[in-house]
Amino acid sequence: MSRAAVWLIVSVALLFSIGLLMVFNTTAAEIIDRSLTTSTHAARFKQIAYGFVGLCGGLFIYRWGHENLIRYSFPLVVGATVLLVLVFVPGIGMKINGACRWLGFLGVPIGQPSECVKILMPAAYIFWFLKQEKPIALAPFLKILAWLSIPGALIFLEPDNGTTFILFLVFMFLFFLSNIRLVYWALPLCVLLTLGGTLAYQMPHVKSRLQVYLHPESDLRGKGHQPHQAKIAAGSGQLLGRGIGESLQKLNYLPEARSDYIAAIYAEETGFIGILVLIALYIALACAGFLIAIRSEEKGAFLLAASLTFLIAIQAFLNLGVVSGLLPSKGMTLPYFSQGGSSLMVNIVCFAVDSNAESMN
């Protein structure tokens, strides 16, 4: 096993372990503060269960191989697209916080199909790319974009702007790595950014988020509450933090403390030093993943490992950017760290795919 693989495994294990402690920390405080009858260990056991299921799925993908994942990516994308349609069907899909992102059974959320698409869409593009004559012509490039835009459009309509934006960035990264001519996507990108930005700004929830981002103090009792409280939490940690378990913001002051804003509670309890350690772990993870990709002898393994590493790294960057107030809120979990079943399982599968690419070197 190479050093890169060791760093990858250690980084993921530490992130999950620290995150598990913070999930228990925040949920236990919420249960005690609200005098709920739920066990203080319920969220921790649930996170462990999701991690175990994700590990089983990751082991299956590891044994199955990245070659098969790429080979069967098109039918898998078709299946995922069907699931994306089902989230809009009453009785099957569930609407939570104004978004139709979850499949459910008897009123219980099962999972978000959009999380699986984060892996399958890049794999489908890579499968198409490997079959094409080089250099890539414009007509087939537009065809694959049109085909992949179907699940992307469904995710956008849920609405899930965070996942849509992440997929957009991942594909820009893939176009660069696969040497697609800039004229095919750079100019259309500028047009799409202009049109997409204009369209998104007309959407009430996007417009309100941008307004809150620019002026959070204007809505402290509403959507500006979380960004404002996150800043208080992170700032009050100072250099060394209040100490593990000593956060005040987790006592029902900061909603979503165990998911989107868990890094704010971590910053309050461990301070600036703790955040530096967290950032260092994500940097180590990203460097190990990209090093594995660079050493891959197969083009498909290189593209898949690099794109999935970028996927994890960009999610971490965006989440920490939101928590620190540098970026507007996107409703995005912190990989391996936040509470979230679907995202955790998919992120573990990404780790398994990277490990499989390393084993083929």
Image (cartoon, helix red, strand yellow):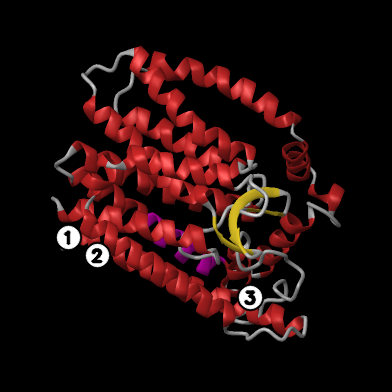
The foreground one among 253 and 192 is: 192
Q: Amino acid at mark 1?
A: Ser
When asked about the image quadrant of residue 280, the answer is bottom left
The foreground one among 198 and 277 is: 198
Task: Determine which residue is flagged by label 1.
Answer: 2
Percent position of residue 121, x then y: 40, 39
Q: Secondary structure at mark 3?
A: helix
Task: Determine which residue is flagged by label 3.
Answer: 26
Percent position of residue 101, x then y: 61, 50
Left or right: residue 138 compared with residue 336: left
Please give the label number shown on residue 122.
none
Q: Amino acid at mark 3?
A: Thr
Confirm or deny contact between disc 2 and disc 3 (CB under 8 A).
no
Predominant secondary structure, magenta span: helix
Q: Gap between marks 3 and 1, in whole Å?
A: 36 Å
Above-or-below relation of 236 to 88: below
Q: Gap between marks 2 and 3, in whole Å?
A: 30 Å
- For image coordinates 86% across by 57% down, the residue present is 221
- For image coordinates 23% across by 43% down, the residue present is 301
Whether residue 274 appears in magenta in the rendering, the answer is yes
Please give the label number shown on residue 6.
2
Percent position of residue 102, x then y: 60, 54
- Which residues make up the magenta segment? 272-285
Whether residue 42 appears in magenta in the rendering, the answer is no
Confirm or deny contact between disc 1 and disc 2 (CB under 8 A).
yes
Which of disc 3 and disc 2 is earlier in sequence? 2
Which numbered disc, 2 or 3, marks the residue closer to the eye? 3
Q: Secondary structure at mark 1?
A: loop
Which of disc 1 and disc 3 is earlier in sequence? 1
